[in-house]
Image: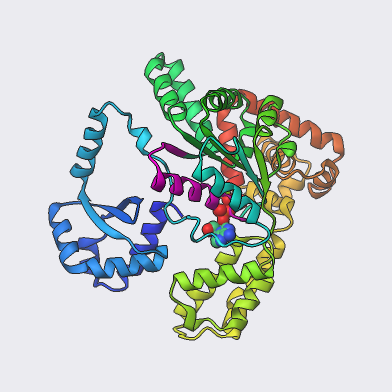
Amino acid sequence: MDLKSIWEEFLNKISDDLSPINYNTWFLETKLINLEKNIATVSVPFHIHKKHLKANYYDLIQKRFTEVSGSNFEFEFVTKEESEEKKVVENNLGVPLDNFQTNLNPLYTFQNFVVGESNKFARTSALSVASQPGKMYNPLFIYSKSGLGKTHLLHAIGNYINENSNQRVLYITSEQFVNDFIELNRKNNDGNNLNAIENFKQKYRNIDVLMIDDIQYLEIAAKTQQEFFHTFNELHTKNKQIIITSDRSPDDLKRLEERLITRFSWGLMVKITPPNFDLRLEIINKKIEAHNLNDEFPTEVKEYIASNCTSDIRRLEGALTRVIAYATMMNESKITNELAIDSLKDYFGNCVGAKNKIEQVLQTVAAHYNISVDDMKSKKRKESIAIPRQIAMYICRTIYDEKLTKIGLAFGGKNHSTVLHSIEKIENQIKKDNHLAQEIKKITNKINN
Ligand code: ADP
Ligand code: MG
């Protein structure tokens, strides 16, 4: 969860404790702006808020926030001016602000990463890199299907390094890297490039540890791959630690430049596989403990969830959240088997449906462009239908690695060469049009949610 969603969930909770007038006056315009080393910094509109919140709501804020985040934080309230002043002071030191922005989520740690057979090796490698960045395995390449803990491990490494040294850590998704690079080129075209290039290099090359999440998205951004190659080389030569995650092994990242793949194999590659029943159960127990709900959860409900959510820890957490929300809505204090089964009926149904990626792509792309799935499967050549159809085929092939014949079948019985032609067309288009790449990224994000 990012800061914004954590705070939204918190506000949602605390609004139930307060009268509307109190909530609107004291909480409505607050924002969580930082979470680090057990301190949560909250921005408030005026000085009076700082005083009032501390004097009247501190304990309640702490309590509700722990329920959302699972850990205990001290709170610091700052007005907008104060947070601006702080930035100015940091800037005046001559150090660019970006260096202070690690993008780390303090809620993902080694302490709350539950270990089992399927992730033991990845976790040990991660810890080893965290204790001696740049010295052990460089790069460290972690790969697995979605929802198995890659992002969690990256943040855990970053938080560990942050706590135990003053090395500069940067966590970034490959999407953000692509965006920054596009922005850099835009400024370049505006003739306003010197500062922009300097900032970009400061951000990515003047650090000790670079963690880049979901590298597979670089596949659809050929130019950015070259820039990443240079960034990689410069950091690696200086013995700076690089950690990369991907939803596939390097060998299966077919659209990445060969020289990048070669470099990934210089270090250590580790795979996380789906959790077995014991690990799933233990993760459920840990999450329930963190929310202080031990008494409400009978063993059989936990086992029911663990047996039905087999492939993905994110979905496992989703199932838990759903059961808890359902019990709250129904005002039940005890969570029974019937309640669990009832609340998870559709959810587990979704799990099964989710297996058919092509169907999901069809539905998502159709919804995105406001056309029907039938249109997508039709032979209509109108641009408003043909282009989304080509994009959908492209996504099925490049992102989900589906076979051409299978895609053809699902798209209303198109032949192999039609599918191939469509995919190539989008590929060429993307090379010329960065916005299209961004749009496709947006769509795939929706599919993964
Ligand atoms: P990925 O990046 O591989 O898609 P995430 O790291 O986002 O997966 O994990 C999905 C969710 O599952 C996160 O909320 C994460 O905290 C949780 N999770 C994954 N693995 C573990 C684990 N071993 N112990 C505890 N929580 C885990
Ligand atoms: Mg991830």
Task: Tell me where residue 203 sits by quadrant.
Answer: top left
Tell how many labels: 0
Task: Tell me where residue 279 sits by quadrant.
Answer: bottom right
In the image, is residue 294 part of the stretch drawn in magenta?
A: no
Residue 355 in picture, x, y percent from top left: 73, 58
| 261 over 371 or under it: above or below | above
In the image, is residue 167 part of the stretch drawn in magenta?
A: yes
Q: Ligand 1: which quarter? A: bottom right
Q: Is residue 449 visible?
A: no
Q: Depth check: 368 or 5 in front?
A: 5
Q: Depth check: 198 or 373 in front?
A: 198
Residue 408 in picture, x, y percent from top left: 82, 44
**Left or right relative to 421: residue 443:** left
Q: Residue furthest top?
A: 191
**Residue at (41% x, 37% y) in the render:** 167
**Left or right relative to 83: residue 381:** right
Residue 44 in picture, x, y percent from top left: 22, 53
Taken as a whole, is the magenta stretch helix, strand or loop? helix
Quarter of the figure that contains the C terminus:
bottom right
**Left or right relative to 134: residue 146:** right
Task: Tell me where residue 402 sits by quadrant.
Answer: top right
| 284 over 195 or under it: above or below | below
Q: Is residue 91 visible?
A: yes
**Residue at (39% x, 52% y) in the render:** 3
Q: Specify start and end residues of the magenta stretch as a single range.
A: 148-170
**Residue at (50% x, 27% y) in the render:** 181
Residue 290 in picture, x, y percent from top left: 45, 69
Q: How is the rendered protein coloured?
A: rainbow
| 226 over 379 or under it: above or below | above
**Residue at (58% x, 54% y) in the render:** 149
